[in-house]
Structure formats: structure tokens, C-alpha cells
Image (cartoon, grey):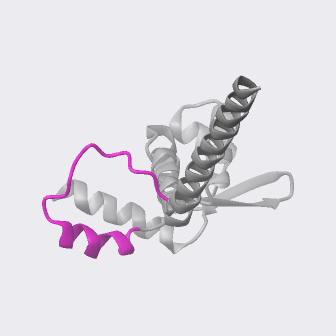
Amino acid sequence: MIEQLFNCQVFVFVIVTYLYMVEQLFNHAIINSMNNETKKTDCEPINLDLVNKIKPNMPDLNLLYELSDFFKVMGDGTRIQLLWALEQSEMCVGDLAVLLNMTKSAVSHQLKVLRTAKLVRAHKNGKKVYYALNDSHVKDIFEKALEHICE
């Protein structure tokens, strides 16, 4: 009987300990989710004041990923040629294909990528689809990049 009582007390102790550990893990997870960050760095800050000053001004991570995707779209030579041509004038797929010595299919594929990224817009005129830069922002970005390269 004493052995059964002892086993029962051990069992209760194990259960209570387990519940305590689960509660601690749960609380830790809640605190981390409230802070919305998990420490991944293996460094300690050299200038903590500077880090704390800059940290609130950092854009949302999703926004930075979108910016990265934007630059990936801009990072293709064929798409840059298309943007360069469209910066000069609105053009149809056939004319762009002749200008860049490409197939209409290849040009259409790249224009679809540029449309998805909202860098170019299209409109129909009869059976032909004409493309142009979406807005002046695209031209401004293009000009600033060229200015940077030519410095």
C-alpha cells in the first residue's frame, strides 16, 4: 500500500512537472510572438543605442521581400532592354521582337513578367496589344540606376 501511494505521488509529481514545463514553453512562445521576433544572431551589439535607434525605422520584412522581388524582375538583361525601348515609346510585341531580335513568344513571356510586377501596362488597338511603361516611377527608377552606374 505504501508502495502504491509512493507510485501515485511520483506520478502526480511527474504530471505537475510536465504541466509546468508545458506552461513555461507556452508562455515563452507567447512572449516571442508578442515581440514578433526570434533571436537568430550569434552576435552581441557593439553599439546597442544605435541598434535600438535604427530598429524601429526598419521596414516590415514582407515589404523588404517585395522590394527584393522587384529588383529580381529588374535584374534581367532582356527585361531591361524591353524597359529601355518602352521608355522611348509605346510598342507592340512584334516591333519589340524585331528590335531585340527575339521571338514574339520570348518577348511576350518577358512582358508578362513586367506586367505582373506592374512595371508596364498594355492596351489593345484592334488586334494588336501595345505596351508602355506603367508610370513615371518606372522611368525615374531607370534613370536613377543609370545615373548611379555612370558616376
The residue at the far right in this view is 126
Please state which of residues 95 and 121 is positioned toward the viewer in this rendering: 121
**Relative to 83, is 150 on the left or the right?**
left
Please state which of residues 133 and 3 is positioned toward the viewer in this rendering: 3
Tell me the quarter of the image containing the C terminus. bottom left
**Relative to 51, is 85 on the left or the right?**
right
Residue at image point 39% right, 50% down: 39
**x and y, in percent, of residue 43 in the image:** 22, 47
**x and y, in percent, of residue 6 in the image:** 67, 30
Tell me the quarter of the image containing the N terminus. top right
**x and y, in percent, of residue 149 in the image:** 23, 54
Tally the numbered discs.
0
Q: Does the magenta stretch include residue 55?
A: yes
| Above or below, 107 relative to 63 | above
Residue at image point 27% right, 43% down: 42
**Relative to 149, is 8 on the left or the right?**
right
**x and y, in percent, of residue 101 in the image:** 54, 32
Q: Does the magenta stretch include residue 60?
A: no
| Above or below, 28 relative to 143 | above
Residue at image point 14% right, 65% down: 47
Segment tinted magenta in the rendering: 37-58
